[in-house]
Image (cartoon, rainbow, N blue to C red):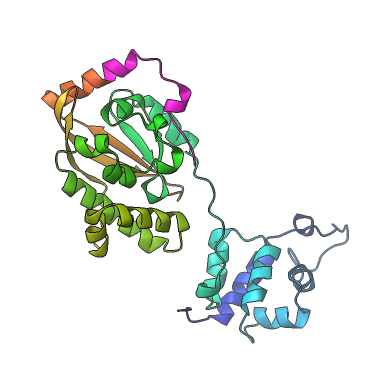
Amino acid sequence: MSSHPDPHALGGFLRARRAQLRPEQCGLPATDSARRVTGLRREEVAALAAISVDYYTRLEQGRVRASTPALATLARALHLNEDEERYLYELAGRTDDRPRRRRPTQRIRPAMRRLLDQLTHTPALVLGRRLDILAWNPTATALYTDFAAIPAHQRNYLRLMFTDPTIRGLHKEWAHDARDAVAALRMEAAADPGDPELARLVGDLTVQDADFRTWWAEHRISSASYGTKHYRHPVVGDLTLDCDTWASPDGSGQRLMVLTAEPGTSSHDGLRILASWTARQTEPEAARHTSR
């Protein structure tokens, strides 16, 4: 359902945005003469958007409702980013008509990479959209599996929870942890229901696993960023680890997931063994990260 239009707010946004642009930014010839307005003139915006000056003027004055084609050309003409474009369509009451932009390839942020590289004594992962595994450190490989050996399109935390026997067997409370992961994905689906990769992931797991079908149909959601996980590792035995995630502040959806143990416990000793073992290995660059 489209939102209720606010023509006067739309006009204010259009005026503010064209005031921020210079002619040369939009491929228009610069002029040495003094301009009577800051930024672009109405007729310049109309020409760039291939609409009439009269129609554009009425849009700014709130005297006509913007059509979907006009919004699309105005978004390009005014060089709107994705957030600004979404806001434009909301003001015009055309949220259902906004075209979906192609989602950019997920790449780990440099700051997140540096932080991950400094976590040498505890398992850590960087999760992206849909719980895709974008990066990991050597101790995470020692705890879970060799992520680099898994094809990139399969390297998803939830997918591996259900389909990888090694990771599935690692979780002592698999049903509890897997159900929580399904609830986290449900939260993402609500925020971005048009994501085709998410739809493909849900479709694959629905076909492959009866538990996933049941839990997905429950519509349970979770945004929990911390908890406790219990593992049974083939080398170091039982581990009780605190799992905390921190969201990137840039809005990319990337999250750093870190697993730690209480000092003085057998779980802490187990992580130290895994960390010392990985420190002796020569880690290939490809085993440290990927992007998709």
Residue in view at x 74 percent, y 69 percent: 45
Residue 265 in sight in this render: no
**Which of the 4 image quadrants contains residue 214?**
bottom left
Q: Quadrant of the N terminus?
A: bottom left
Question: Given the current orientation, which residue lies at the most extreme left position?
Answer: 265
Question: Given the current orientation, which residue lies at the most extreme bottom position?
Answer: 63
Image x and y of residue 42, in percent: 75, 73
Question: Given the current orientation, which residue lies at the most extreme top position?
Answer: 280
Residue in view at x 29 percent, y 35 percent: 258
**Which of the 4 image quadrants contains residue 240?**
top left
Residue in view at x 25 percent, y 55 percent: 212
Q: Nearer the viewer, residue 168 or 135?
A: 168
Number of numbered markers = 0
Question: Given the current orientation, which residue lies at the most extreme front position?
Answer: 207
Residue in view at x 11 percent, y 24 percent: 266
Q: Is residue 227 above or below residue 281?
A: below
Image x and y of residue 275, in percent: 28, 20
Q: Is residue 48 above or below residue 266?
A: below
- Any magenta on residue 286? yes
Residue 182 in sight in this render: yes
Image x and y of residue 128, in percent: 41, 45
Image x and y of residue 67, in percent: 63, 80
- Any magenta on residue 77? no
Please report the bounds of the magenta region as a residue range.
275-292
